[in-house]
Amino acid sequence: MAAVLLAGAVASTGATAQSANVPAGPGAPDLASASDVRTQIAAMLADMKPGQGFAWRPLLRDGARVAAIEIWKKPGRPAVHPAEAEYAIVLEGAGTLISGGTLVAPATRRADLIEGERIEGGTTRPLRPGDVLLLPAGVPHWFGITGDRLVLLGTKLPAR
């Protein structure tokens, strides 16, 4: 069963990813407290421009590995990440996930991102705070937003 998470349709949401100066490597923080998470979400919401559909900001970093907060206010395009699995926890808000099936009209945006027009034959699931999602590399996924936003804590994992 292919359950999913995050996404990578930044361009299609009219949004830009946001980066933060998060230390990496030896001596870098390896814990973000609940207060740190709440503070980062509040800061990201304050920084989002009117009409911006997506914001991404690292919370913890260890070299190329990143645990990031993602805030979705608008759905992106259906996506596939060919070489990375995605793991996420829903922190706030609600949405609808469609995963699996076939990506229709796929177009490669970057080496790590293929977007399409829609997913045919996928499985639809509701998303709520506390839900944990794992999408294997290569599995199409998309989610809609229920309410004003969907907030995820996510990371990408290299495919085996």
Image: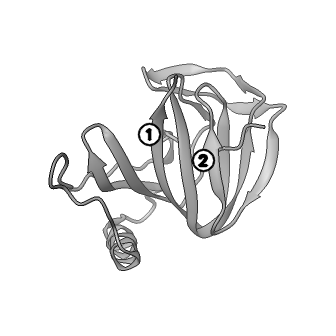
Q: How many marks?
A: 2
* 76 up-or-down from 51: above or below: above
**Where is 126 relative to 119, above or below?**
below
Mark 2 crowd level (few <14, some 14–19, many ≥20, 10 Å Cα): many
Mark positioned earlier in the residue sequence (1 or 2): 2
**Residue 8 visible in the picture:** yes
Q: Of residues 16 and 3, which is closer to you in this image?
A: 3
According to the picture, the residue beneath numbered tag 1 turns out to be 11
Looking at the rendered structure, which numbered label has been put on residue 2?
none
Image spot of residue 41 (x, y percent): 39, 70
What residue sits 54% from the left and 40% below the top?
86
Please state the horizontal and vertical placement of residue 140, each as a whole percent of the image: 66, 31
Res. 110 image quadrant: top left
Q: Residues under labels 1 and 2: Cα distance?
A: 18 Å
Q: Position of residue 34 (x, y in %)?
A: 41, 76
**Towards the viewer: 149 or 84:** 84
Question: For numbered disc 2, what is the local secondary structure?
Answer: loop
Q: Secondary structure at mark 1?
A: helix
Q: What residue would you read off at disc 2?
A: 5
Height in image: 61 above or below 141? below
Tag nearer the camera, 1 or 2: 2
Name the residue at 39% across, 54% down: 68
Going by the numbered disc 2, the residue's amino acid type is Leu
Tag 1 near tag 2, CB within 8 Å:
no
- Nearest the viewer among 109 and 123 is 123
Q: Position of residue 101 (x, y in %)?
A: 78, 29
Lateral position of residue 45 relative to residue 144, left or right: left
| Amino acid residing under circle 1 | Ala
**The N terminus, quarter of image:** top right
Q: On the picture, is 40 further left or further right than 95? A: left
- Nearer to us in this view, 41 or 14: 41
Residue found at the very far front of the displayed protein: 26
